[in-house]
Image (cartoon, rainbow, N blue to C red):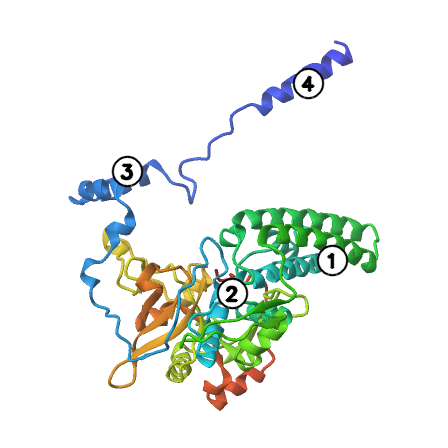
C-alpha cells in the first residue's frame, strides 16, 4: 500500500468515526430525568380529578385572567387623606424614559404652583438627547479605560452588553438638567423616535460596539490616549448626527410665554436652556438624597454602583439603605408639605392595569397551579426575581386614625391608563416592591441624614440593583 492510499484511508476512517452517534449516558446517572420519574409525575397529576378542567382552562385562556382574584376587587378605594394637586397627564409611550418623566414631573409640580400656571410640561426629548450623547461618551471612555483587559473580562463583557440604554435613575436626571438646562415641551416636542426608542437604541448600540472594537484595536497597537480621544471625538460626532436626525436639534435659545391659571398671558421672554432651568426648576437638586430599601444588604450603610451614571464627570448612583418604615416617615412629611417625590418600584408585580391598583392579592397563581411561589424581598433581589424597574412621582398617602398609611398614590407616565393616569399602591405592596425614594434633606431626621457622610461601599455594575428603571 502506498503512503498516499494509507493516509487517504486513515482520513476517511477518522471522518466516519466523527459521525458515530454519541453514546447515551446510563439511565441510572445521577441528576438525569428518567422514564420512571416521568411516569411518577404523570401519575401524580392524573390523581387530581380537577386536572382535565384546569388544563382546558389554562390552555385556552390567559393565565393573567385565570389568576385574577375576584374576591379582592373593590377592597381598595380611591380616597386619600393627603394628596398633592397634580395638573396634566404625561405619556412616555414606547420608551424607557420614565426616570426623565418622573424627575421633570416632580419639578413641574413646583413650577406650576410657584408661577400659578394653567398648564405646563418640560421637554423630555431635550433632556433625552443629551442623556444619550453623554451615555455614548461614558461608554467610549470606559472602553479606553479597559482596552488592555481581555474581552472575556467581566467588566469588559458587561460594557459590551450594555453600551447604551434609554433607562435611568434620579442621579442621571440631575446630571443632565444641571449641565444642559431644560426647555418647555413646546420648544422641543417628542419626535417619533423619542416616543418609540427601540429602533434608535438598536442603531446606537451597534454603532458603539463597532466603535469599541476599533478603540480596543488601536489601544492594543500602542495608540496614545490623546490619539484614542481624537478618534473618540469623531465617533461622538456620528452619535450626535444619529441623535439630531432622530430627535431633532436641541435649541440654544428660544422665546417663550405662558398662560396663568387666571387666563393672563405672561410677557414673551428670551431664554437659554440654562436660564430656563434657573427660573423654572424651583429647587436646589443638590438638596435631594436617595433612599433604598434592600434587605439583601446591611441597612444604615451607603452604597455606590459603578458606571451607574450617564456622564463621565457625574456621580454614580449613591444611596442610603434603610428599612422601608423609616422611608415612609420622611415620605409622609414631604407629602403633607405638598412636595412630590421621585419614587421607583417593581411595577410589574401584581399590577391590576384596568383599575390602576397595586396590591399583593390582585392575582393568585399559587391556587391555579397548586405551587408555592412565595419569596422574601431579600431573596427576590438576590435571584433577580425583583428589582427597581419603573420610576413614578409619589404624590399622595391615605393615613388611618393612628397616622399609619393604608395606601399611596403615584403619578404615572403611561397616559390616562390605570386610575386616570395614576396608580394606587396598598401599603403592604409598598413594603414588598418599593425600592428607591428621592427626598429633600429637610424631611429627614438628623441622625439618618448624618449617615450619608459615610464612604459608600462600591458595588459592581452587574449588581442586582443596577437595572435602570424605565
The mark closer to the camera, 3 or 2, is 2
Q: Earlier in the sequence, mark 4 or mark 2?
A: 4
Which percent across, then down, holds residue 267? 54, 75
- Which badge, 2 or 1, comes first in the chain's sequence? 2
Say if residue 315 shows up in the picture.
no
Query: How many angstroms separate mark 4 from mark 2 (CA)?
Result: 67 Å
Q: Quadrant of residue 81?
A: bottom left
The residue to which callout 2 is attached is 100
Q: Residue 10 — which label?
A: 4
Name the residue: 68% across, 14% down. 9
Q: Residue furthest left?
A: 49
Report whether 41 appears left or right of 391. left
Q: Are marks 4 and 2 in contact (CB under 8 Å)?
A: no
For marks 3 and 1 on the same chain, the one whose residue lies earlier in the sequence:
3
- Regarding mark 1 in the picture, which secondary structure is present there? helix
Percent across and percent down for residue 209 are 66, 49
Q: Which mark is residue 144?
A: 1
- N-terminal label among 4 and 3: 4
Earlier sequence position, callout 4 versus callout 1: 4
Nearer to the camera, 117 or 171: 117
The vertical placement of 365 against 42, above or below, is: below
The label number, if any, that marks residue 39 in the structure image: 3
Of tags 3 and 1, the one toward the viewer is 1
**Number of on-image labels:** 4
C-alpha distance separating marks 2 and 1: 28 Å
Residue 336 seen from this side:
yes
Q: Quadrant of residue 51?
A: top left
Query: Disc 4 vs disc 2: which is toward the camera?
Result: 2
Amino acid at each position: 500500500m502506498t503512503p498516499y492510499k494509507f493516509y487517504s484511508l486513515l482520513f476517511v476512517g477518522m471522518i466516519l468515526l466523527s459521525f458515530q452517534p454519541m453514546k447515551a449516558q446510563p439511565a441510572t446517572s445521577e441528576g438525569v430525568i428518567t422514564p420512571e420519574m416521568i411516569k411518577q409525575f404523570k401519575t401524580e397529576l392524573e390523581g387530581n380529578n380537577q386536572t382535565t378542567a384546569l388544563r382546558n382552562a389554562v390552555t385556552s385562556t390567559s393565565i393573567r385572567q385565570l389568576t385574577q382574584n375576584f374576591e379582592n376587587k373593590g377592597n381598595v378605594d380611591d380616597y386619600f387623606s393627603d394628596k398633592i394637586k397634580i395638573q396634566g397627564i404625561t405619556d412616555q409611550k414606547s420608551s424607557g424614559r420614565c426616570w426623565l418623566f418622573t424627575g421633570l414631573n416632580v419639578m413641574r409640580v413646583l413650577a406650576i404652583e410657584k408661577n400659578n400656571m394653567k398648564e405646563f410640561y418640560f421637554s423630555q426629548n431635550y433632556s433625552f438627547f443629551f442623556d444619550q450623547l453623554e451615555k455614548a461618551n461614558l461608554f467610549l471612555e470606559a472602553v479606553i479605560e479597559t482596552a488592555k483587559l481581555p474581552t472575556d473580562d467581566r467588566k469588559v463583557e458587561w460594557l459590551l452588553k450594555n453600551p447604551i440604554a434609554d433607562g435611568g435613575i434620579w442621579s442621571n436626571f440631575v446630571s443632565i438638567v444641571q449641565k444642559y438646562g431644560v426647555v418647555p415641551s413646546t420648544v422641543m416636542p417628542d419626535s417619533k423616535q423619542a416616543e418609540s426608542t427601540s429602533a434608535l437604541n438598536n442603531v446606537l448600540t451597534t454603532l458603539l460596539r463597532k466603535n469599541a472594537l476599533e478603540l480596543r484595536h488601536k489601544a492594543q497597537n500602542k495608540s496614545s490616549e490623546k490619539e484614542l480621544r481624537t478618534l473618540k471625538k469623531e465617533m461622538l460626532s456620528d452619535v450626535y448626527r444619529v441623535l439630531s436626525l432622530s430627535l431633532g436639534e436641541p435649541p440654544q435659545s428660544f422665546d417663550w410665554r405662558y398662560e396663568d391659571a387666571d387666563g393672563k398671558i405672561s410677557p414673551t421672554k428670551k431664554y437659554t436652556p440654562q436660564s430656563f432651568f434657573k427660573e423654572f426648576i424651583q429647587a436646589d437638586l443638590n438638596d435631594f438624597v436617595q433612599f433604598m430599601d434592600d434587605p439583601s444588604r446591611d441597612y444604615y450603610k451607603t452604597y455606590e454602583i459603578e458606571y451607574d451614571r450617564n456622564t463621565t464627570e457625574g456621580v454614580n448612583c449613591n444611596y442610603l439603605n434603610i428599612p422601608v418604615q423609616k422611608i415612609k416617615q420622611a415620605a409622609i412629611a414631604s407629602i403633607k408639605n405638598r412636595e412630590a417625590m421621585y419614587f421607583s418600584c417593581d411595577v410589574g408585580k401584581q399590577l391590576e392595569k384596568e383599575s390602576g391598583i397595586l396590591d399583593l392579592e390582585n392575582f393568585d397563581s399559587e391556587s391555579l397551579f397548586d405551587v408555592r411561589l412565595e419569596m422574601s424581598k431579600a431573596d427576590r433581589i438576590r435571584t433577580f426575581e425583583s428589582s427597581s424597574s419603573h420610576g413614578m412621582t409619589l404624590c399622595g398617602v391615605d393615613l388611618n386614625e393612628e397616622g399609619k398609611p393604608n395606601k399611596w398614590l403615584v403619578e404615572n407616565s403611561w397616559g390616562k391608563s390605570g386610575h386616570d393616569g395614576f396608580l394606587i399602591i396598598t401599603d403592604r405592596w409598598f413594603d414588598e416592591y418599593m425600592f428607591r425614594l428621592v427626598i429633600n434633606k429637610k424631611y429627614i431626621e438628623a441622625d439618618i441624614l448624618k449617615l450619608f457622610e459615610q464612604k459608600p461601599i462600591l458595588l459592581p455594575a452587574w449588581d442586582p440593583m443596577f437595572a435602570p428603571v424605565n
